[in-house]
C-alpha cells in the first residue's frame, strides 16, 4: 500500500489588531522600537479597581471593519477580528472564492467573555432587585431587557458567524475556547485540518477583549494582575525578580494557511511553515502551572515530535511569559527540561512585556510574531527585565531586538485551567531542505 504524502502547511498571510497597532506592520514597528501599549484604562471608569491599567486597542474605529447593521450584532472584539482577517487575506493575495469555498476552513480561538456588564446590570436591576432572581417575572416579560440582538451578540460563536458570512467560507470550521491557550490551539487545529486533507486553505487565529468591569474585576479577584498603576509601561516585566502580575490586553490576529505546494506553485510569499503542535492539559491549579513545568514539558516534547524537529535547530522561543511569579518559573523549568544544556543558548522573549496579555488572542498574535521574526530575521525583546531572578536564568533578549537568522521557532501558550499549547514554525529554506530529504 502506498503511503500518503504528509501535507505541509504554509503561512502566506498575516493580519493583526493589537495594543501596539491596527495592523501587522505598525505592530511590528512598535515592537522593534520598544514602545509600550500599556496605559491607564480609558474605555470605562476603573478608578475603583486595584488594577487600573490595561493594554487597550487605541483609536480603532470599528466602522472600518463592520457596517452599521453588523455592529449591532457585534461584541467589542468582533471588529478587531474582521479587520485582522481582511488584512490577512489581502496579504496572502487569495480569498475563498465560490468555486473553492468548500475547501476553505475557519478555526478561531474565541474570546472568553461575551456578556456586557450593562446587560447583566439591567437583568439584575429588573429581575433580582433584592438579590433573589425572579425567574417567573423574566419568563413573563423577558423582552423588556433581553432582545434578539443582545442574544446574538452574546453567543460564543457570534464572531465566527460574522467571519463565515462575510467571506463565504463553507468548509471545515471550529471554535476553540481554552482560555489563554485558545489562539495557539486554533493554529494547531487548522494545521492538522490541512494535513488530513479536510481543507486546502484555512483562515486561523484568535480574538478577545476582557477589558471591561467583569473581566478586570475577575482577574483582580484572582490576584493575577499587576497593580503598578503609576508606571503602566513597566507593569509587565516577565522573568524579572520584582514581577507582580500580568496586564490585561485585547486584540486579534489571523493567519492564512495553505497547503505548501499550492502556495509555492502560485508564487505566494511564504512567511514560514507551520510544522508542529503540542497540546496537553495539566490540572495542578486553575491559575498556576506546576513549578516543575509539568504539562508544558509534555506540550513542548509533543510539538517537537509532531514536527519531527531536533532541539538543535530551535533558534528562538516566544515565551508565554505572563509576568506572574509562578508562570515564569514554571515555563523556564519546562524549557530547561526539554532543551537541557542548550536551554541557556536559545533566545527566549515575551512580547507581553510590551502588549500585555491578550488572553484568547495571545497565541494567535504571538504565532504571527513568530512568522514575522522568521521572515525578518529579528527576535523581539523582553522589555522591563531589570532585576534578574536567579530562578529565571535563560537568555531573555533584554537588550533590545536581536538580528538573527531563524530556522525553527516555538511559540508557547499556557491557559488558565491547565491548557498547554506549543506550536512550531520553520523558515521556508529550512522547510524546503527538509522536504528535499523526505
Image (tube, helix red, strand yellow):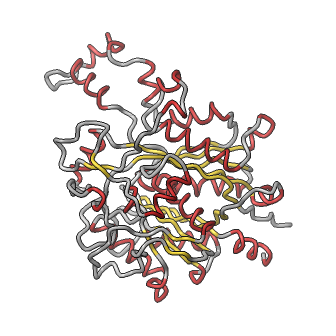
Residue appearing at x 42%, y 54% in the figure: 180
**Residue 246 visible in rendering:** yes
**Camera sees residue 281:** no
Residue 291 picture quarter? bottom left
User: Of residues 123 and 386, which is closer to you in this image?
Assistant: 386
Q: Quadrant of the N terminus?
A: bottom right
Side (left or right) of 344 relative to 136 = right
Along the horizontal axis of the image, is 225 left or right of 72?
Answer: left
Q: Position of residue 362 (x, y in %)?
A: 45, 54
Residue at 52%, 74% in the rendered image: 316
Q: Is residue 62 above or below residue 47?
A: above
Q: Is residue 318 above or below residue 76?
A: below
In the rendered image, the residue lying farthest to the right is: 1
* Above or below 179: residue 131: above
> In terms of image quadrants, where is residue 240?
bottom left
Query: What residue is drawn where x is 56% and y is 58%?
Result: 368
Furthest residue to the front? 33
Q: Nearer the viewer, residue 308 or 270?
A: 270
Q: How many marks?
A: 0
Q: Quadrant of the C terminus?
A: bottom right
Among all residues in the image, which is located at the extreme top?
Answer: 140
Image position of 61 (left or right of 307): left
Q: Position of residue 156 (x, y in %)?
A: 46, 36
Q: Farthest residue toward the left?
A: 130
Q: Note whether 155 is above or below 389 in the view shown.
A: above
Determine whether, in the image, residue 268 is placed left or right of residue 358. right
Image x and y of residue 86, in percent: 61, 41
- Nearest the eye: 259 or 41: 41
Q: Position of residue 262 (x, y in %)?
A: 80, 55
Amino acid at each position: 500500500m502506498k503511503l500518503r504524502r504528509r501535507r505541509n502547511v504554509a503561512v502566506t498571510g498575516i493580519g493583526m489588531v493589537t495594543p501596539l497597532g491596527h495592523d501587522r506592520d505598525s505592530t511590528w514597528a512598535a515592537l522593534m522600537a520598544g514602545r509600550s501599549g500599556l496605559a491607564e484604562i480609558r474605555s470605562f471608569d476603573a478608578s475603583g479597581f486595584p488594577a487600573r491599567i490595561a493594554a487597550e486597542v487605541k483609536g480603532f474605529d470599528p466602522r472600518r471593519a463592520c457596517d452599521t447593521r453588523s455592529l449591532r450584532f457585534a461584541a467589542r472584539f468582533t471588529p478587531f477580528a474582521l479587520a485582522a482577517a481582511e488584512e490577512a487575506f489581502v496579504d496572502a493575495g487569495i480569498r475563498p472564492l465560490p468555486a473553492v469555498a468548500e475547501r476553505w476552513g475557519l478555526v478561531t480561538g474565541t474570546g472568553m467573555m461575551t456578556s456586557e456588564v450593562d446587560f447583566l446590570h439591567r437583568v439584575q436591576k429588573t429581575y433580582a432587585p433584592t438579590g433573589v432572581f425572579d425567574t417567573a417575572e423574566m419568563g413573563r416579560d423577558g423582552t423588556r431587557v433581553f432582545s434578539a440582538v443582545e442574544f446574538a451578540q452574546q453567543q460564543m460563536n457570534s464572531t465566527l458567524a460574522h467571519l463565515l458570512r462575510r467571506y463565504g467560507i463553507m468548509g471545515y470550521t471550529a471554535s476553540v475556547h481554552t482560555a489563554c491557550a485558545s489562539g495557539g490551539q486554533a493554529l494547531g487545529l487548522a494545521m492538522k485540518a490541512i494535513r488530513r486533507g479536510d481543507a486546502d486553505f484555512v483562515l486561523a487565529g484568535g480574538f478577545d477583549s476582557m477589558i471591561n468591569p467583569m473581566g478586570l474585576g475577575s482577574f483582580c479577584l484572582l490576584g493575577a494582575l499587576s497593580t503598578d498603576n503609576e508606571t503602566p509601561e513597566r507593569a509587565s516585566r516577565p522573568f524579572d525578580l520584582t514581577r507582580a502580575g500580568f496586564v490585561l490586553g485585547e486584540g486579534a490576529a489571523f493567519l492564512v494557511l495553505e497547503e505548501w505546494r499550492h502556495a509555492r506553485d502560485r508564487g505566494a510569499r511564504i512567511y514560514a511553515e507551520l510544522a508542529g503542535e503540542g497540546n496537553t492539559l495539566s490540572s495542578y491549579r486553575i491559575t498556576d502551572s506546576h513549578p516543575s513545568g509539568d504539562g508544558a514539558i509534555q506540550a513542548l516534547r509533543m510539538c517537537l515530535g509532531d514536527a519531527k524537529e531536533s532541539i538543535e535547530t530551535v533558534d528562538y522561543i516566544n515565551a508565554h511569559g505572563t509576568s506572574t511569579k509562578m508562570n515564569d518559573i514554571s515555563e523556564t523549568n519546562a524549557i530547561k527540561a526539554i532543551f537541557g544544556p542548550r536551554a541557556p543558548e536559545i533566545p527566549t522573549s515575551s512580547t507581553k512585556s510590551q502588549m500585555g496579555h491578550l488572553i484568547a488572542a495571545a497565541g494567535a498574535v504571538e504565532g504571527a510574531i513568530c512568522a514575522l521574526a522568521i521572515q525578518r530575521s529579528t527576535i523581539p525583546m523582553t522589555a522591563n527585565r531589570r532585576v534578574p531572578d536567579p530562578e529565571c536564568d535563560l537568555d531573555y533578549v533584554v537588550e533590545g531586538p536581536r538580528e538573527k537568522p531563524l530556522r525553527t521557532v516555538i511559540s508557547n501558550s499556557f491557559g488558565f485551567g491547565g491548557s498547554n499549547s506549543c506550536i512550531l514554525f520553520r523558515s521556508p529554506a529550512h522547510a524546503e531542505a527538509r522536504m528535499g530529504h523526505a
